[in-house]
Image (cartoon, rainbow, N blue to C red):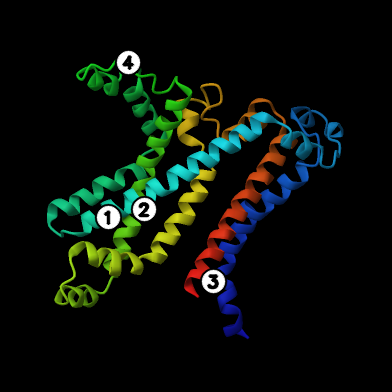
Amino acid sequence: MRTRLTPYLFVSPAMILLIAFGIVPILIAAVISTTNMNISAFMNWGNVKFIGIDNYTKLFADPAFWNSIGNTALFAVVGVPAILVLSLAVALLLNHSQNRFFQVLRSFYFIPAITAIVAVSLVWGYLYNTQFGVFNYLLSFVGIGPVQWLSDPTLAKFSVGLVAVWRGTGLNIIIFLAALQAVPKEYLEAAALDGASGWKKIVSITIPLLRFAIFFVGVTTTISWLQFFDEPFVLTDGGPLGATTSASIFLYKEGFRLNQFGYASAGSIVLFAIIAVVTLVQLRVKGNDDD
């Protein structure tokens, strides 16, 4: 009996935390999304009324919501491949040599992952500054006038996305480096004896053996982009003209600036469903690939 209960005792703390901070908030949001709850509820709970799916009907007819979903999809479609390719390329280069310089360089590339996002975004904000920023100063040497990095709707998407890509590569490089350490050297040595070039060994041996790490980074990076919030919130606050308003920023403004808790909860449930569907599709594709 004691032996049978031992595994449950080990997993119970994690399960309790998952239920308390993961599942219960989702259930509460689902309930609130069916009400007209706003800030007046804190004065009198009698102001909260059940309205069924009205919040969802209003949400699906809201152009601002669809604009935020479109921005989020664009960021994810461009950002996920960019981070995957860049992280893997840097990890392969760093793994190519084991001398002290490259070991120090590994710590350098990890810095973005441990630096506070507000500090990072403020520094990038100064770099993007139209009048005094470093980027426009460097472009002036080749005769290019001031660029509106954060004021032009199209360029603003690129600017906040670039910061997110730079920040997202650090941890993923470490994950790929750890996976590269597990690639059996016997395979690479056998390929070298057969005359395979360095590029051929990477394409035919290394990358196929990294498929689980690539899958893991792909799933976690996709979820991060679908919850994209920090960089556009600090750099542009979702502007200009909603060009960098992600779904998370839209929900934040509705919930905590306009105090429409029921409406924001409906949006959060929709975003949760989108993330769940995308993740399930990735898991299904990975399952078919294993077959």
Q: Tell me what residue is drawn at x 35 percent, y 65 percent.
A: 210
Please tell me which of labels 2 and 4 falls first in the chain.
Answer: 4
Give 156 or 107, whichever is nearer the viewer: 156
Mark nearest the camera among 1 and 3 is 1
Q: Is residue 32 above or below residue 287?
A: above
Q: Disc 4 on helix, strand or loop?
A: loop
Of labels 2 and 4, the one closer to you: 4
Report, in whole angstroms, how far the alpha carbon at label 4 lies from the one at label 1: 35 Å
Q: Which residue is mark 2?
A: 172
Residue 67 shows in the view: yes
Identity of the amino acid at label 2? Asn
Residue at the (61%, 54%) spot, across then down = 276
Q: Earlier in the sequence, mark 1 or mark 3?
A: 3
Q: Nearer the viewer, residue 86 or 133?
A: 86
Q: In which image quadrant can residue 145 be found?
A: top left
Q: Secondary structure at mark 1?
A: helix
Q: Earlier in the sequence, mark 3 or mark 4?
A: 3
Residue 247 seen in this snapshot: no
Q: Nearer the viewer, residue 190 or 177?
A: 190
Which quadrant would residue 5 be assigned to in this image?
Answer: bottom right
Is the C-beta separation of discs 3 and 4 under 8 Å?
no
Q: Position of residue 237 (x, y in %)?
A: 51, 26
Q: Are marks 2 and 4 in contact (CB under 8 Å)?
A: no
Q: Residue at x 74, y 28 (%)?
A: 39
**What's the CA distance linking mark 1 and mark 3?**
35 Å
Q: Name the residue tied to disc 1.
A: 91
In the rendered view, would you say 142 is above or below 275?
A: above
Inter-mark Cα distance, 2 to 3: 29 Å
The residue pinned by badge 4 equals: 146
Q: Secondary structure at mark 3?
A: helix
